[in-house]
Image (cartoon, helix red, strand yellow):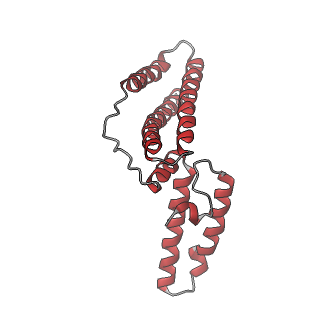
Amino acid sequence: MNYFELFGLEAEFSLDLNELSSAYQALQKTVHPDRFAHSSSQEQLLSVQKSAEINDAFNLLKQPITRGEYILKLRGTELASEQQTLQDVDFLMEQMELHEMLGDIKHASDVDAALFAAQETLDVQSQHLWQQFEQLLTDDNQQNNHKAAELLRKLKFYKKLQIELERIEDALFDD
């Protein structure tokens, strides 16, 4: 089953999340297990399964990284495993520098400014990659899809850095 079709949406990266949410809620109303409380056990089981499938589809499509992966999968583009090393040495060096920047935040003389600068850096750099990714998806061909998959792998690095930054911020302000 195609998740975009499930929600009546075009298989495009750019989604109206409000439209996705409305379609999700409408579908859930039709299959919610409470509606099948007095039905046969088989119908109840099917309702639970369908509801879980709709939840999975919604959660996948509402997140940009998983939505991008799904679009590429629909196009027949296999994504490299997380363990496969990126060949872009410059990118890996940038990632090391960004990790160092995050590590230096707690020792900064102005922690708020360091947090803001780190957030700004991550936002600008990841936004640049997202723009490239979306541009590549506009033309469905093997070369563009392969390049888009590589960008998505890079964007996962930024997502991990963002999570790390949030963890650092929480730790600093929980003390």
Figure disc tally: 0
Foreground residue among 172 and 143: 143
Q: Can you give x and y, in whole percent of width and height, for residue 52 in the image?
A: 50, 66
Q: Can you give x and y, in whole percent of width and height, for residue 167 in the image?
A: 49, 33
Q: Can you give x and y, in whole percent of width and height, for residue 132 in the image?
A: 54, 35
**Residue most toward the top?**
109
When asked about the image quadrant of residue 23, the answer is: bottom right
When asked about the image quadrant of residue 22, the answer is: bottom right
Foreground residue among 5 and 29: 5
Foreground residue among 104 and 1: 1
Say which residue appears at 43% left-offset and 46% top-offset.
142
Above/below status of 127 relative to 26: above
Say which residue appears at 57% left-offset and 48% top-offset.
13
Above/below status of 121 relative to 139: above
Above/below status of 139 relative to 159: below
Q: Is residue 75 left or right of residue 54?
A: left
Q: Can you give x and y, in whole percent of width and height, for residue 152 in the image?
A: 46, 40
